[in-house]
Image (tube, grey):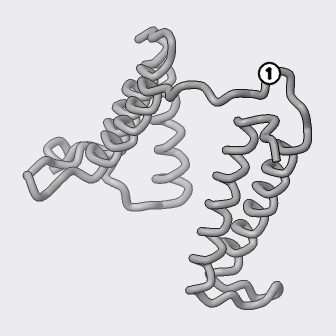
């Protein structure tokens, strides 16, 4: 069988693999019923839907002709590394690293760090726009997680709050 769209083929395989993994992992929890859902019900249904979606996309990539075969391009290393680094920095700033005595800097600093590093993944970097975005995100995170959901995140660095 001939692959007519490489991008669709590999993305369909990825969706199928992630869906199967979610569904398989969900079987270790109580499923319950539709009326009284257990902790495994939602991941199981999500996994099944993702696997079906992946199968449809993979099938489509084998059947529907594309103009140039939709070849998969080279890896975008710069965005990949900056996005991974931004997430690691967020976790480090939010929770600290007690094993090396690195203090937690809190949610506000973590959001700013995440936004600045993640914005370096793009084609252009404008510090003024990034700082405005980081400020808006920090305010929204504070409102959503601290005030509305009442989650117990450190908001400010420990050396400031005591």
Residue 69 percent across, percent down from the top left:
78, 27
Dividing the picture into quadrants, the one containing residue 53 is bottom right
Percent of width and height locating residue 138: 45, 35
Residue at (76, 55) in percent of width and height = 54
Residue 65 placement, left or right of 105: right
Q: Residues within 10 Å of mark 1 (few under 14, many from 20)?
A: few
Q: Secondary structure at mark 1?
A: loop
Residue 19 against residue 95 in the figure, above or below = below
Q: Nearer the viewer, residue 21 or 134?
A: 21
Instruction: Estimate the x, y position of residue 79 in percent, counting from the top left.
Output: 46, 26
- Would you identify the image quadrant in which residue 64 lies? top right
Q: Residue at x 78, y 35 (%)?
A: 5
Q: Which x, y percent locates residue 115?
A: 43, 29
In the depicted structure, whether residue 122 falls above or below residue 47: above
Q: In this figure, which residue is indicated by the disc labeled 1?
A: 68
Depth check: give the residue in front, 108 or 39: 39
Nearer to the camera, 62 or 117: 62
User: 63 or 87: nearer the eye?
Assistant: 63
- In the rendered view, does 71 fall on the left or right side of 158? right
Residue 47 left/right relative to 102: right
Q: Residue at x 38, y 32 (%)?
A: 81
């Amino acid at each position: 069988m001939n692959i007519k769209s490489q991008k669709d083929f590999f993305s369909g395989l990825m969706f199928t693999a992630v869906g199967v993994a979610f569904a398989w992992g969900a079987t270790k929890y109580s499923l319950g019923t539709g009326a009284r859902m257990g902790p495994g019900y939602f991941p199981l249904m999500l996994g099944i839907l993702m696997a079906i979606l992946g199968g449809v996309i993979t099938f489509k990539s084998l059947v529907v002709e594309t103009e140039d075969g939709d070849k998969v391009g080279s890896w975008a290393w710069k965005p990949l590394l900056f996005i991974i680094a931004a997430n690691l920095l967020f976790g480090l700033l939010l929770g600290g690293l007690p094993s090396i005595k690195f203090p937690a800097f809190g949610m506000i600093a973590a959001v700013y760090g995440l936004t600045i590093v993640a914005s370096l993944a793009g084609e252009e970097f404008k510090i003024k726009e990034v700082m405005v975005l980081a400020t808006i995100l920090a305010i929204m995170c504070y409102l959503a997680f601290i005030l509305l959901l009442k989650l117990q995140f450190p908001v400010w660095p420990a050396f400031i709050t005591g």
